[in-house]
Amino acid sequence: MKRKLITCFLTSILAAMLLAGCGKSNEPETVEEEETAPTSAATAEPTPTPEPEGFAVIEEREVVDGKMQSYLTGEWKDESVVTRRPIAVMIPNNAPAMPQYGISKASIIYEAPVEGRITRLMAVFEDFDDLDRIGPVRSSRDYFVYVAMGYEAIYCNWGLARPYVEELINRDTVQNISAAVEGIYNPAHEAFDRVSRPGYATEFTGYLFIDGMKEAAERLSYDWDYDDAYVPPFTFAAENVRAQDNYQDAESATKIMPGGTEGNKGGYGAYTPYFEYHEDDGLYYRYQDGKEQTDEIDGSQLAVSNVVFQYCHGEVRDDHDYLAFGVHGEGDAIVFTGGKVIKGTWKRYDGDATPAKFYDENGEEIIFNQGKTWICNIWQEYGEFAKYE
């Protein structure tokens, strides 16, 4: 799909949202009325990222025996998977919703505060053909929509914060698979259903079904091909190269705590999540509420190759405690990979259809290890609580 030009009017709206900044929030929501989705794209080969001098990174992708290196993880996958736009699914992250189903298959997990001062997840999947469903699925917030648009993902949600999402999610530039609720103009009835979960509240029983999602995308004439101006979100170390070798002088950390160790109102204080780095496999394992965070499919613990702290200005919008986060512009960032701590910045100035990029203190793009990435949106005004050791 070809990118649409952003009018001056929309630009002013985005500028206002940037001033509104990041947000905070806890989990429980009652009425969720809106949703948002990313822009579609037309087929094309992404522009390669320049290779940092003296260190090998993945540049131009090539097909070898039907496989390519993923734009989202750097790993070798079927060409049909790598060249297909992903889906971005809204998933609750509070204790009453656990465990989540299918989340370990996501290539990127974006975590941000919502009302109630807890966090919600947006899981970005490119490998979803072998899944029957994903969920439970919850409602949309506008800053999640804007992040999904940067990945050119098809945005999937059940409900929305209408005052801030309705106009956005129903734009032509936001392709979404949304459950039929008030505020959604083109609902995808075939994509969602409820699953029996005795003892769970109704809002934690709604799931996205993959076959129905594909049917809905076809009915809505969504294009599965990346735009010809597509920008991959990360620069990955080349095959058999470790990103940490480029940062030997950086400090090390084996425990990462986006909300610190004590309660606070920055979104991560309710369940005090953290990651533990295992040097033997180079992965960061996720814990929450004092225990392993797992996938209901097989009980496996969630683990990723990279963790990012992306600091955003945030504000409380109204009496409902809805939050706003600035996900355009720039801010501080910390990337954790291979046990190393790389401090720098994030920048996103090229519109909705490009992702935030991460740079070190020398202004060079940070190199990620191949594998999955977890991005924690840190509410800048509560940034003092984010810790690592």
Image (cartoon, rainbow, N blue to C red):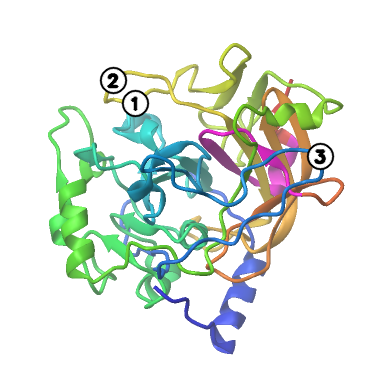
Identify the residue at the far bottom of this view: 8
Q: Which residues are magenta?
A: 365-384
- Tell me whether the residue at label 3 lies in contact with that at label 1, contact meaning CB atoms closer than 8 angstroms: no
Quadrant of res 337: top right
| Badge 3: residue crowd in 10 Å (few <14, some 14–19, many ≥20) | few
Identify the residue at the far top of this view: 280
Q: Is residue 17 left or right of residue 185?
A: right
**Residue located 47% across and 80% down the image:** 4
- Tell me whether the residue at label 2 lies in contact with that at label 1, contact meaning CB atoms closer than 8 angstroms: yes
Indicate the position of residue 35 as horizontal and vertical percent values: 35, 63
Q: Secondary structure at mark 3?
A: loop
Identify which amino acid the numbered label 3 is placed on. Gly
Indicate the position of residue 106 as horizontal and vertical percent values: 40, 38
| Badge 2: residue crowd in 10 Å (few <14, some 14–19, many ≥20) | few
Q: Secondary structure at mark 1?
A: loop
Identify which amino acid the numbered label 1 is placed on. Asp
The residues tagged by marks 3 and 1 sit, at their Cα atoms, a distance apart of: 39 Å
Asked if 326 appears above or below 114 in the picture, the reply is: below
